[in-house]
């Protein structure tokens, strides 16, 4: 459609500011935005109508046939991918017999996952407790430093004379 870069938009904005003026510029931009929105809506509706007409006339089937004829390997790989996706979507290891090897492995993996989650939660709690202790120790040190007199400051004003 239009090929406008940032510099062109900046020039258009400056010219609009000079020609229209700062008071009416927001109104102008609002109206331009509405016009662009209406144009996009009409383009979207036109595109949707054309796609529906193509679907009704069977044009998509013809296009798919041409694609298959021009690139048989690509269309075969698309078919393989679709078949693999359909096949793996139906696989659920938890629906197998619990006494089968697959059921045992699924149960074992679920237990391992729970153990890993529990260990991770414990490690996070330990880390947070350790960080809290360190923060408390730093706060105690800071408080002690504020309460203690400076080491170079004299204790008794009369002793310095």
Image: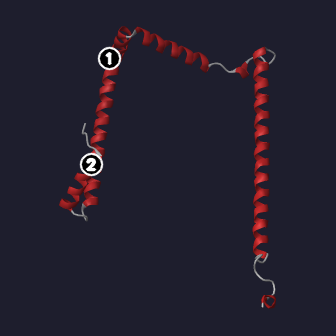
Residue visible at 25% across and 39% down in the picture: 3
Position of the C terminus by quadrant: bottom right
Q: Which residue is mark 1?
A: 59
**Coordinates of residue 160 in the picture (x, y in percent):** 78, 88
Q: Which residue is mark 2?
A: 7
Residue visible at 80% across and 57% down in the picture: 133
The quarter of the displayed image where residue 155 is located: bottom right
Q: Nearer the viewer, residue 93 or 153?
A: 153
Q: CA distance from mark 2 to mark 1?
A: 42 Å
Q: Secondary structure at mark 2?
A: helix
Q: Nearer the viewer, residue 136 or 42?
A: 136
**Coordinates of residue 69 in the picture (x, y in percent):** 36, 8
Is disc 1 surrounded by few (<14), some (14 to 19) or many (20+) residues within 10 Å? Answer: some
Viewer-nearest of labels 2 and 1? 2
Residue visible at 61% across and 18% down in the picture: 88
Is disc 2 surrounded by few (<14), some (14 to 19) or many (20+) residues within 10 Å? Answer: few
Residue visible at 32% across and 17% down in the picture: 59
Q: Is residue 63 above or below residue 18?
A: above
Q: Image check: 105 left or right of 4?
A: right
Q: Secondary structure at mark 1?
A: helix
Q: Image check: 89 left or right of 160?
A: left
**Coordinates of residue 71 in the picture (x, y in percent):** 38, 11
Q: Is residue 108 above or below residue 79?
A: below
The quarter of the displayed image where residue 98 is located: top right
Q: Is residue 54 above or below residue 115?
A: above
Q: Are marks 2 and 1 in contact (CB under 8 Å)?
A: no
The quarter of the displayed image where residue 20 is located: bottom left
**Coordinates of residue 47 in the picture (x, y in percent):** 30, 31
Q: Image check: 73 left or right of 122?
A: left
Q: Earlier in the sequence, mark 2 or mark 1?
A: 2
Task: Residue lying at the far front in this picture: please name it.
Answer: 161
């Amino acid at each position: 459609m239009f090929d406008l870069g940032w510099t062109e938009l900046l020039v258009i904005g400056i010219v609009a500011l000079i020609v229209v003026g700062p008071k009416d510029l927001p109104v102008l931009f609002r109206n331009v935005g509405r016009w662009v929105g209406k144009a996009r809506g009409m383009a979207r509706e036109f595109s949707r109508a054309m796609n529906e007409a193509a679907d009704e006339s069977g044009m998509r089937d013809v296009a798919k046939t041409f694609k298959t004829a021009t690139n048989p390997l690509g269309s075969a790989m698309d078919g393989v991918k679709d078949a693999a996706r359909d096949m793996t979507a139906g696989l659920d290891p938890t629906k197998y017999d619990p006494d089968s090897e697959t059921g045992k492995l699924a149960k074992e993996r679920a237990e391992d996952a729970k153990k890993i989650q529990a260990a991770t939660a414990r490690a996070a709690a330990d880390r947070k407790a350790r960080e809290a202790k360190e923060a408390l120790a730093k706060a105690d040190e800071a408080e002690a430093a504020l309460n203690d007199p400076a080491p170079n400051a004299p204790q008794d004003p009369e002793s310095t004379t």
